[in-house]
Image: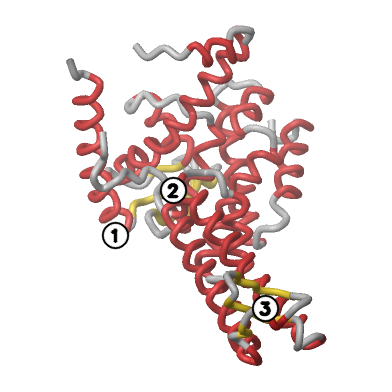
Amino acid sequence: MLHFPAYDILYCKMSNKEEATREDSKRSQLYKGIAEVVLLSLLKDGARYGLEILDQLRSIARLSLADGTIYPLLYRLERAGFVASEWHFDTKGVRPRKYYKLTKRGSAELKVLLVEWHELSSNVDSFLNRQ
Amino acid sequence: MKDDPSFSTYIRHLRWSLASLPADERDDIVAEARSHLQEKLERGARIEEAIDGLGAPEDFARAFITERALLSALGSRDSMGLLAALGERSIRNARTISATAGCVLVWVLALVVCAVGAAKVFDPTHVGMWIGGGQFILGATDDPSKGHEVLGLWIFPIAFLVLFLAWLASRGLSVWALRPLASVGLRWPRRPSL
């Protein structure tokens, strides 16, 4: 494991709470990037609404995203043309929900991203498991 | 539930915070947040938990506004919008740092040339670009006889040309740096250098 003395000095007086916040923030940044690919992949299986997407990213992909991160992400993907949205009422006909589906452009983008993801994860694995 | 004061206050603050967005987008975001909160409450979450999940209305709104500013600047190719968007993200990554440094450099150069051009209108004898006698001067000199003034009245069209090139270069650099941020964020290098 890499060890940086200066890093220890900087953070030695950090409280447990501060440290947990910092770890959460680092994890959150990492997750944001990964969430986009996982989200596009999820929408490949069919249209879904925000909370449903969050549930599945958490339960299937095991990504612990805050509720508030998913909607700006969907907004960005929609404006980039990778997803399209439509409002529909839920099964009880009570509440309107905004459903997102993958567009052709999003589907093409997903293919490119998956190739890049597999290539990168393979390279990172090789690096981390080096002798 | 939705009559809870915290609920209505959150929705009202969110709408205010989204004021800079077009009305249809603002309505859409607010309606989606309302639907989200209602469903969370129906699942048994407390109103505070549901609201905490989305974050403070100002922060939640800012995420949309920032995304829109970036995409709008890239879509319209508005130079000032592009530079402003680059400025806000100047230290995001190596590409934005390089582009910001490049923009600053070309604009400083352009402004210096323009300032010399403007000064030459008032003092054509002592202002210009001198080369010779082991020195290079771009600006004003007390003794114009030390070197050879090479630009003369060409300083004016050159100032316009440099200004145009700076505008062109800063637009190009901004688009180059911002476009990867606007598309899907998970952009791996084509050939990872690990």
Question: Tag 1: residue type?
Answer: Lys
Marker disc for residue A99: 2
Q: Secondary structure at mark 2?
A: strand
A131 shown above or below B10: above
- Image coordinates for residue A116, horizontal then vertical, percent: 24, 43
Q: Nearer the viewer, residue A91 or B18?
A: B18
Q: Residue at x 61, y 54 (%)?
A: B87
User: What amino acid type should be assigned to the residue bearing mark 3?
Assistant: Lys
Q: Nearer the viewer, residue B59 or B37?
A: B59
Question: Which color scheme is applied?
Answer: secondary structure
Dot 1 alpha-carbon crowd within 10 angstroms: few under 14, some 14 to 19, many 20 or more = few
- Residue type, numbered disc 2: Tyr
Residue denoted by label 1: A104
Q: Mark 1 falls on what kind of element?
A: helix
Q: In this rendering, is residue B4 above or below A22?
A: below
First in sequence: mark 2 or mark 1? 2
Q: Chain of mark 3?
A: B
Mark 2 vs mark 1: give the one in front: 1
Q: To which quarter of the image does residue B1 belong? A: top right
Residue visible at 21% across and 37% down in the picture: A118
